[in-house]
Amino acid sequence: MTSLESHEPPYEEYYRVSSTSARLITTARADGRRLIAVGTTVVRTLETVMDDQGSTHPGEGWTSIIVSPERGDTRSVHALLTGFHEPQATHLAMLEAFASRHHLKLAYQAALNTGYRWHE
């Protein structure tokens, strides 16, 4: 999920989901397993290809979905693994869809205190 400058909406991103991946994701959800996205693009992609009944469909194209607290809960994944992002980055809106701003501030402060580096 990239944007030119702080507080700008992210660019559209290209995605491709194979029929095998779509089937595995749908089966995992049906079995009640947790789905953890690795990266913000994965979240946007899966939000794009999942229908209202929770089935993931194969496909490819460009997604313009913006995941944020205002949009509501994510339907496709339960958690997100990502790097640390600049405080003004639009990535933080997506992170706030998974964790409260207070929790994110605590995590960022702990990271700064122990020498973690920013995402880029």
Image (cartoon, rainbow, N blue to C red):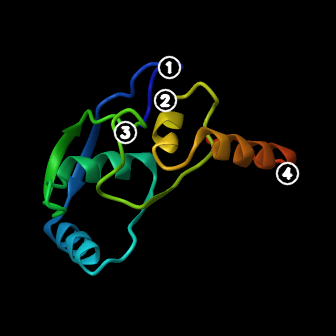
For image coordinates 73% across by 45% down, the residue present is: 106
Looking at the image, residue 60 sits to the left or right of residue 103; the answer is: left
Measure the alpha-carbon separation of dots 3 and 1.
Answer: 14 Å
For image coordinates 65% across by 47% down, the residue present is: 103
In what element is the residue under mark 4?
Answer: loop
Do labels 1 and 4 touch, CB within 8 Å? no
Do labels 2 and 1 touch, CB within 8 Å? yes
Q: Nearer the viewer, mark 3 or mark 4?
A: 3
Q: Nearer the viewer, mark 3 or mark 2?
A: 3
In what element is the residue under mark 1?
Answer: loop
The amino acid beneath tag 4 is Thr
Residue picked out by circle 1: 7
Residue picked out by circle 3: 67
Measure the alpha-carbon separation of dots 2 and 1.
Answer: 6 Å
Residue 24 in the image: x percent, y percent?
23, 75
Pointer 3 local density, CA inside 10 Å: few below 14, some 14–19, many at least 20 = many
Q: Which mark is residue 90?
A: 2
Q: Which mark is residue 114?
A: 4
